[in-house]
Image: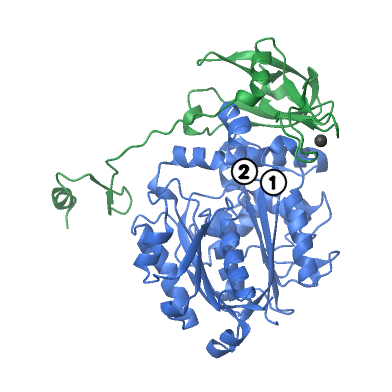
Chain colours: A blue, B green
């Protein structure tokens, strides 16, 4: 297998993007990635597109996107892994380059959720999981699923709603400085605590929003990368794992087994100590679709012991200057969560962090040159953990 | 350009203006209604037992794994036609939430308690918990698995009660 470098990145503004259509939105990220890398369309050997779709009108989005972006007749596929679809697209592009099948590959994540009404989007998200046995008769929602985790987690470890709220406050704090974020507004603990319940104990401000957005990365093999850039960022690992579709079949409701497994695989591949990964990693983007998800991520990734993730939030250890800065992009909570774009967006953000190209207020100190992305599909149905590095 | 002029521009077109940005949006003239038909033939025993107020799981005669939701195949032993067993009526509440913001197709129900309970034989079930006083719900409490009529549709489905 060949080493794989990130050659260029592109990222649209996230938000309610009724100012552009689906194809224009996709092109925003592709164009930026082409310009950032200096690669022209005909040099790209392979394209992987992630788009959950259903709420947007193009049922087979790859063809219209490639046509609009001048990418025909490049080989292309679409991948789907719920909210981890973006990482699945990066993995597909990574595999194409690593295997030698392609020299240059592009991964595009795109989602246009505002083509449908809120109720329908809530419904389509809720259908992720096991449609017949869980959705059809009992109408869980996506936030409802995570509320089942939040309730049990709080019960077992004595965490409080205020601890969850601190995650939202932190992520909004950093999102304020991210020009691509959907919500550029700092919030207070009181704002979160006084917001209405969506699925008890989770409130409106514990939830990521409905978002339109696109993100793209261009990957290349080592010899090609060297022709284009002096400062490539390397994908040291992008490892996935899965867990049961029925939430009822999980061992417990305090951890995501697929996240633990994906992290183990990624740390092993990147040669990072499983015991104290936070000593190696300069900055992480974790999947905070709901505040509880970020706290459980701390534990599944080994940033905190089981049952102590909420203490990292309480002690503000995941701000810059703490034990490990997390979600300096604003996270899904404030940057926004365009379902199949999120995984690609995380890779874009961490590439910029490692190259020290983000706004100064939210730039992590880069000491070891390692960054981690944790991208969860559904309620852990699919998880990818990626490690990026400044060194090959 | 004034609001009135904008409206005139799109007369006789299926175009609406975004409330915030005022940008034109094509409002689809094609509307699709999706309603899936999901075969149940191999697990019909589960549904015939429901009318006798029984909740069934399947068990592999070889490795003795229990499956809920019931499935007729054991992927580990690669045998089919697993045995049907009844799920015990008494279980323990593992976790719950109250769904306030509901999906489109659940809007007509009152806020419901979504819960997961555990039973003997390593079975856990996600369903609704029917309880008058939601403040009395406690993780770890005993719950009963029952069959009741889902209204207003009027079909039988399993749920939990205190
Ligand atoms: Zn078996």
**Residue pointed to by mark 2:** A193
The chain containing the residue under callout 1 comes to: A
Percent coordinates x, y for residue A242 in the rendering:
70, 51
Q: Nearer the viewer, residue A45 or B33?
A: A45
Q: Earlier along the polypeptide chain: callout 1 or callout 2?
A: 1
Residue A44 can be seen in this image: yes
Expressed as whole percent of the image width and height from the top left, the position of residue B93 reads: 77, 27
Residue A132 placement, left or right of A162: left
SS at circle 1: helix
Whether label 1 touches label 2, CB < 8 Å: yes
Q: Is the residue marked by circle 1 packed among few (<14), some (14-19), or many (20+) residues within 10 Å?
A: some
Residue B56 percent across, percent down from the top left: 73, 21
Alpha carbon separation for disc pair 1 and 2: 7 Å
Q: Ligand 1 is in which quadrant of the figure?
A: top right
Q: Work out whether B141 lies above or below A386.
A: above
- The residue sitting at the top extreme is B52
Instruction: From the viewer's perspective, tell me whether residue A150 is left or right of residue A171.
Output: right
Identify the subunit bearing mark 2: A
Q: Residue at x 63, y 79 (%)?
A: A233
Quick one: A262 or B130, which is closer to the camera? A262
In the picture, measured across the screen, residue A112 lies left or right of residue A326, that is left
Q: Is A255 located above or below residue B129 in the figure?
A: below
Q: From where the camera sits, is residue B130 visible?
A: no
């Amino acid at each position: 297998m060949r080493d794989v470098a990130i050659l260029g990145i592109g990222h649209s503004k996230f938000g309610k993007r009724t100012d552009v259509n689906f194809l224009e939105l996709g092109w925003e990220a592709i164009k930026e990635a082409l310009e950032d890398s200096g690669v022209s369309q005909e040099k790209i050997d392979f394209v992987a597109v992630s788009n959950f779709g259903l709420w947007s009108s193009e049922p087979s989005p790859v063809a219209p996107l490639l046509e609009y972006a001048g990418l025909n007749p490049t080989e292309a596929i679409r991948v789907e892994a719920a909210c981890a679809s973006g990482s699945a697209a990066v993995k597909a592009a990574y595999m194409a380059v690593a295997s030698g099948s392609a020299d240059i590959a592009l991964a595009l994540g795109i989602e246009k959720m505002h083509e449908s009404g809120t109720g329908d989007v809530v419904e389509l998200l809720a259908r992720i999981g096991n449609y017949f046995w869980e959705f059809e008769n009992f109408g869980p929602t996506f936030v409802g699923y995570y509320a089942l985790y939040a309730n049990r987690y709080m019960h077992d470890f004595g965490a409080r709603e205020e601890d969850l709220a601190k995650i939202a406050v932190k992520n909004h704090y950093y999102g304020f400085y991210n020009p691509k974020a959907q919500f550029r507004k700092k919030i207070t603990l009181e704002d979160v605590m006084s917001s209405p319940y969506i699925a008890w104990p989770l409130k409106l401000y514990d939830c990521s929003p409905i978002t339109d957005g696109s993100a793209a990365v261009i990957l290349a093999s080592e010899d090609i990368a060297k022709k284009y850039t002096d400062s490539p960022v390397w994908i040291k690992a992008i490892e996935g794992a899965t867990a049961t579709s029925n939430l009822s079949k999980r061992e417990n409701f305090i951890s995501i087994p697929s996240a633990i497994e994906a992290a183990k695989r990624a740390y092993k591949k990147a040669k990072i100590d499983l015991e104290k990964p936070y000593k190696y990693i300069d900055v992480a983007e974790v999947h905070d679709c709901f505040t509880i998800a970020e706290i459980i991520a701390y534990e599944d990734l080994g940033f905190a012991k089981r049952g102590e993730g909420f203490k990292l939030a309480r002690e503000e250890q995941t701000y810059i200057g703490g034990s490990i800065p997390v979600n300096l992009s604003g996270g899904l909570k404030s940057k926004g969560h365009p379902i199949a774009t999120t995984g690609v967006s995380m890779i874009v953000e961490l590439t910029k962090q490692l190259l020290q190209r983000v706004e100064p207020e939210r730039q992590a100190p880069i000491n070891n040159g390692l960054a981690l992305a944790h991208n969860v599909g559904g309620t852990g149905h699919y998880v990818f953990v990626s490690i990026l590095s400044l060194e090959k | 350009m004034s609001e009135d002029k904008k409206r005139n521009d799109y007369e006789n077109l299926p175009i609406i203006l975004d409330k915030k940005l005022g940008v034109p949006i094509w409002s689809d003239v094609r509307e699709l209604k999706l309603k899936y038909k999901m075969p149940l033939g191999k697990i019909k025993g589960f549904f015939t037992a429901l009318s006798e107020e029984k909740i069934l799981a399947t068990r592999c005669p070889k490795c003795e794994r229990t499956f809920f939701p019931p499935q007729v195949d054991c992927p580990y032993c690669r045998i089919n036609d697993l045995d049907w067993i009844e799920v015990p009526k008494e279980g323990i509440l593992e976790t719950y939430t109250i769904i306030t913001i509901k999906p489109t197709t659940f809007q007509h129900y009152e806020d419901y308690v979504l819960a997961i309970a555990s039973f003997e034989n390593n079975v856990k079930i996600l369903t609704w918990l029917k309880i008058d006083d939601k403040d009395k719900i406690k993780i770890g409490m005993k719950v009963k698995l029952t069959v009741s009529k889902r209204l207003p549709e009027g079909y039988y489905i399993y749920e939990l009660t205190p």
